[in-house]
Image (cartoon, rainbow, N blue to C red):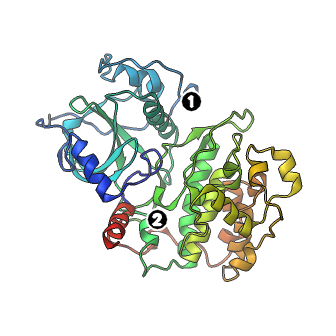
Amino acid sequence: MGCVLGRATGRIKTRRKQKNDDRRDSESAAGPVENEVPERGKGKKIEEVPVPSSAAEVPDFRLRRGFSTGGDGWPSWLNDVAGQAIKDWKPRRANTFEKLDKIGQGTYSNVYKARDLITGKVVALKKVRFDNLEPETVKFMAREILVLRRLNHPNVIKLEGLVISRMSSSLYLVFEYMEHDLAGLAAVQSVKFTEPQVKCYMKQLLSGLEHCHNNGVLHRDIKCSNLLIGNDGVLRIADFGLASFYEPEHKRPMTSRVITLWYRPPELLLGATYYGVGVDLWSAGCILAELLAGKPILRGRTEVEQLHKIFKLCGSPSEEYWKKSRLPNATLYKPQQPYKRCLAETFKDFPQTALSLLESLLAIDPDARGTATAALNSEFFTTEPYACEPESLPKFPPSKELDIKLRDEEAR
């Protein structure tokens, strides 16, 4: 799809739910962001500024009610939670954008396709309401800003600016608009990716993850709908609403309630709170298999069923792993009889180099999954046929996961 969607915005809802929510939304899906005449000379292009290391995590804060602003034009509460990340930016005015269409919706925010009236550029606006200043909502949004300001890579979505709307008590995150996401392309029945095309997409995904991990960021919601594809074939990892900072040498407890179920690794399903890059690499492995198989490979309906499917495919953990991990849900979900790993047999039609990489990425023990750098150096990418260039990827008409979901809803 053409914007940032996923857990930060919540799971996409049905058309019926959208209609109800749209009635409650004070702004229409199209038209100016605010009913004001755009001012000339506002909204210069915003350059990215690295986030100092001191902004390593969202600080503890007490939210200051109201829309009081400092001399820099930012609401006081935003300075409280993300001051380091925005200190060199100036807020854009909401009336310098025109909303064209609503393209995504979730628990914490809505996403719109919009036009920048200053530059004429089409962008994606991720709207977060802050009239009630719910601490959880603010923390998600602040952390997303902090994370995105730290990252700067061709395969990671770039935060281009922030928009303040006093009229609707909202903050908009401005992103480049992209026509596709990988979920939308994969759902087209006529699309069958070739091996060079799969390698191209995976190389870009792993390159983006390598940059995230090298900069101390875990994405924690890697899935096809969060991988945006431009008309130039470039893939960008998007939706950092569940992302978190981490330090390998100074691990701290984190929630296990992250990552969409089909792409969630076994250690999180077992309640792990200390984890690292392995959670993103498991998700990447699921995507590699999905692109080659033409469909998601682990489609559980519940956490118990998902874990059962994982064990049936990848084998159940060894006794040594159970002992060393001491996972909270181990006694609850430990199978009575061990499962044998059958990944190679299940995907015997996959290229051998792809199977070898899958064996690493879908290892039950997260320590055995390696790193994104190691995956990029695997034989899957260093042997023929090589990854094609992004610009040589086939061109598709605009497609978004939301459009596909709505069509499916109507068909039922």
- For label 1, the crowd category at 10 Å Cα-Cα, with few meaning under 14, some 14 to 19 and many 20 or more, is some
SS at mark 2 in the image: helix
Which residue appears at 58% of the width and 76% of the height? Answer: 293
* Residue at far left of view: 37
Kind of residue indicated by mark 2: Leu
In front of the other: 206 or 342: 342
- For label 2, the crowd category at 10 Å Cα-Cα, with few meaning under 14, some 14 to 19 and many 20 or more, is many
Which residue appears at 61% of the width and 74% of the height? Answer: 386
Quadrant of the image occupied by residue 374: bottom right
Residue 366 screen position, x and y as percent = 74, 53
Residue that label 2 marks:
182
Q: Earlier in the sequence, mark 1 or mark 2?
A: 1
Look at the picture and state if 236 lies above or below 217: below
SS at mark 1 in the image: loop
Image-based side of 373 in relation to 326, left or right: left
Residue that label 1 marks:
57
Residue 270 screen position, x and y as percent = 71, 49
Kind of residue indicated by mark 1: Glu
Residue 285 screen position, x and y as percent = 64, 63
